[in-house]
Image: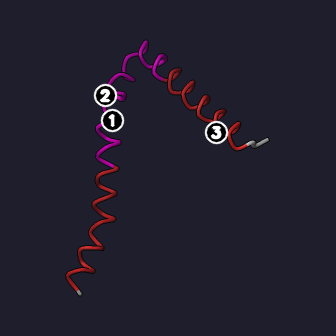
Amino acid sequence: MNNLLDNIYKFPRFLISIILGFFLTTFQPIFKLLKNKKTNTLILTVILIILTSIYTTIKLMLSIN
């Protein structure tokens, strides 16, 4: 029974490390692009448009005033 509990306690740490690794490998190229002034404004504009469209879509889907 002790062995089972030890294995169960390992899963949250494993899940956190998987999620953290995913975000680090996903955003690393974006951070490299943000160092250039031209790509900086372009990337930030695209991210802002995406976040605004997601916010608006969810707001309309849930009928939030």
Q: Residue extending furthest right?
A: 65
User: Looking at the image, which residue is at 34% across and 50% down?
Assistant: 19
Question: Closer to the camera, 26 or 64?
Answer: 64
Tell me the CA gap for discs 2 and 3: 28 Å
User: Which of the 4 image quarters holds residue 17?
Assistant: bottom left
Question: For the residues carrying marks 2 and 1, which lies nearer the camera in this image?
Answer: 1
Mark nearer the N terminus (3 vs 1): 1
- Secondary structure of the residue carrying tag 1 is helix
What amino acid is at disc 3?
Ile
User: Looking at the picture, does residue 46 appear above or below residue 60?
Assistant: above
User: Looking at the image, which residue is at 26% across and 69% down?
Assistant: 10
Which label belongs to residue 29?
Answer: 2
Question: For the residues carrying marks 3 and 1, which lies nearer the camera in this image?
Answer: 3
Which label belongs to residue 26?
Answer: 1
Tell me the CA gap for discs 3 and 1: 24 Å
Q: Residue 34: within the magenta?
A: yes
Q: Give the position of the C terminus as an image quadrant.
A: top right
Residue beneath disc 3: 58
Q: Residue 54 at what x, y percent from top left?
A: 59, 33
Q: Give the position of the N terminus as an image quadrant.
A: bottom left
Q: Residue extending furthest top?
A: 38
Q: Which residues are magenta?
A: 20-43
- Secondary structure of the residue carrying tag 3 is helix
User: Looking at the image, which residue is at 42% across and 15% down?
Assistant: 37
What amino acid is at disc 2?
Pro
Tell me the chief SS of the magenta region: helix
Tell me the CA gap for discs 2 and 1: 7 Å
